[in-house]
Image (tube, grey):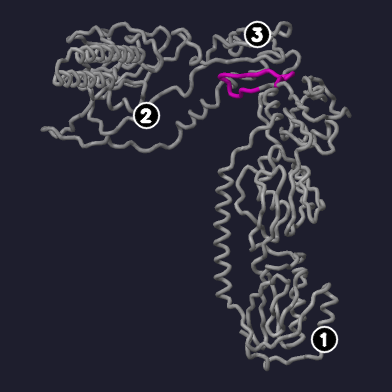
Amino acid sequence: MIAGTTSALAQTGGGGGGATGGAAGGFGGASISAPSSLSGTSIQSGAQNAQTRSAEATTDRADDATRRAEVSSAVRDVPTEFEEMVLASTGRRVPIFGASLFSGVPSTFAPIDEVPVNDNYVIGPGDEILVQLAGQFNDKLTLRVDRSGAIQLPGVGSVQVAGLHYGQLGSFLNQQLGRYYRNFTLSAQLGRLRTIQIFVVGQARRPGSYSVSSLSTLLNAVFASGGPLPSGSVRDIQVRRGGKVIEHFDLYDLLLHGDKSHDIALASGDVVFFPTVGPQVAIMGSVAVPAIYELKGEKDVASVLELAGGQTNVAAGQTVRLERVHDHADRSMRDISLDSHDPIRDGDIITVTSIIDRFRNAVTLRGNVANPGRYVWHEGMHLSDLFPSREALVTRSYWRKRNQLGQAQQDYAPRSGSQPIDEEGALQVHGSQTERESGSNSSKTATSSDGGGSSVGAALTASNNLFDAKTDVVLSAPDIDWGYAVIERQNKEDLTTSLIPFNLGKLVLDHDASQNLPLQAGDVITIFSKADIRVPGSQQTRYVRLEGEFVASGVYSVQPGETLRALIQRAGGLTSDAYLYASEFTRESTRRVEQQRLAEYADELEAQISAVTASNQARAATSGDQLAATASAADARSAVARLRRMQPIGRIVLDLRPDSQGWIRFPILRSRTVTASWCRASRRT
């Protein structure tokens, strides 16, 4: 409140007239009425103003939520006939350029009031002015411009401010108050801004009357109304004021060049009009932005392609395909040069083709090699040019896995679970040796808690090992197939593809000139591993694991034609404590066959159970009979489930007798699978 502060200010009535005249001339018609006394003047408190602004902000948020709900319930745009024609012709639905800009709901319906106001903002009725006074008296004034364009300045009276620019407001009010008071400072800024009413009509997505902030521009109105319909123009958005078109806005200037210089501020009563869309063309293929574009002055192919961002770096040739509706009767196709000045017409579909994915001077190396990929082809090129050394055939994954073998690992951990102690103080073994190792190497045998695969030999040969096994010998990668590699070549005459095999071992290891075949551009050379094609048994890499009462238990690589008896002899034979009759021999291929047969047997039992259950229920005379049939079927299916959980071990029975002794008694067996055979010699008890 400033009431009663008249004596505190030195009045300067003589200088007031000059100030009034200067203000009137300097601000273009701004006038001030006769001053009134400061005494008895009431100023709205800051707290009341804050409450008023808070209530208005809450109302705006509610209105904004209502508008978002209306937008979300709006029906999706129906494709135009031209969009459907492009889809039918090309198989692709191409969007209208710029339509995605209006696909989302605007977060606010009008610009927020907290944004800075530029100095060119024109003050009008409804604006709120915040005045800060300091000096011999301090006060904060919240003044609203009334319908006549004036504010009531305490101690001065009615001051006409409508039509002033915001940049002039502070100096103007300071000048008017200085006519009557001295020794003070004044600062003025805008608070809540007025709203204006505009109209959005034509091919707008949500036409109607809008109340927006006085800071709103044409673009704000365009986004608030959801933009134009697919049938509306984005290149000639008009602003009409006082019955005249004052602006033609091309949205492409903003989308393509970031230019919004024609985005004018709106005034109350303005009409934003979306006319019907102009001529349209579809641009497809190898362009930066394939879409449907509206034309406005673009007449030839070059200018139209510029709308789409030009050709991509994989566009082919200097011509494009042009599809045209001919005389509103039928459609025609033609090729047109990029520098042609033939006019582009409404409804044209322009397709820019891309280059063919063909290398004219390259050969491709693939498969079990260190550096697969494309290599430069040259005249006189042969296979040996691709393999400078045999190391070129070792894959990178092989070296990565080999390198991992040298990494630090965790120490051996004690086996989980407590071990009971027998009468003699020795730790008793729970589970078989097979169970201990089944978790560390899937290629070895496994036992089942349901009884599948357990053996007496496993129980007899199990040691009092307190630690789980964690180290094994396995192939880091499949070995190279030296006997076969192939060149894939396309015939240039009839475009048929032929395979030209060659012996990789003779080429790389023996340097056989007959296998050093010449290469042609486009050839694909494939190098196989033994995992890709099954090779003869003599060429397979096979490991056998010997455990138990062997002189040198371990993992051995089986030599071609080597038998089990010969392998045991090479391992040093058996110890004096070996008990041959309890020995166990397993094979991975046998385990797989057993697993398959077990699954087939479970399937047959399942089918029989279903048939018997259906028959029993059909013959059941009472509810008790039906319950009994159901319970019987449940028990049978439970047994089948246990059968499916069984894990066979792939054991092969050895022809041994209880009194057999020495490795010479082992039968002559040949290991036939890779890294899968396992022989255990039991300890005599």
Badge 3 local density, few (<14 within 10 Å), some, or many (20+)?
few
| Circle 1: element type | helix
Residue numbers of the magenta segment: 357-373
Task: Report the residue marked by disc 1.
Answer: 17
Q: Nearer the viewer, mark 1 or mark 3?
A: 1
Q: Gap between marks 2 and 1, in whole Å?
A: 105 Å
Residue at 22 percent of width and 8 percent of height: 656
Of labels 1 and 3, earlier in sequence is 1
- Disc number for residue 341: none
Q: Are marks 2 and 3 in contact (CB under 8 Å)?
A: no
**Mark 2 lies on residue:** 471
Task: Identify the amino acid type marked 3.
Answer: Thr
Between label 2 and label 3, give the one nearer the viewer.
3
Residue at position x 71%, y 47% from top?
201
Q: Amino acid at mark 2?
A: Thr
Up-down: is 590 above or below 85? Answer: above
- N-terminal-most mark, 2 or 1: 1
Residue 497 disc label: 3
Q: Is residue 455 magenta?
A: no
- Residue 368: % across, % down: 56, 19
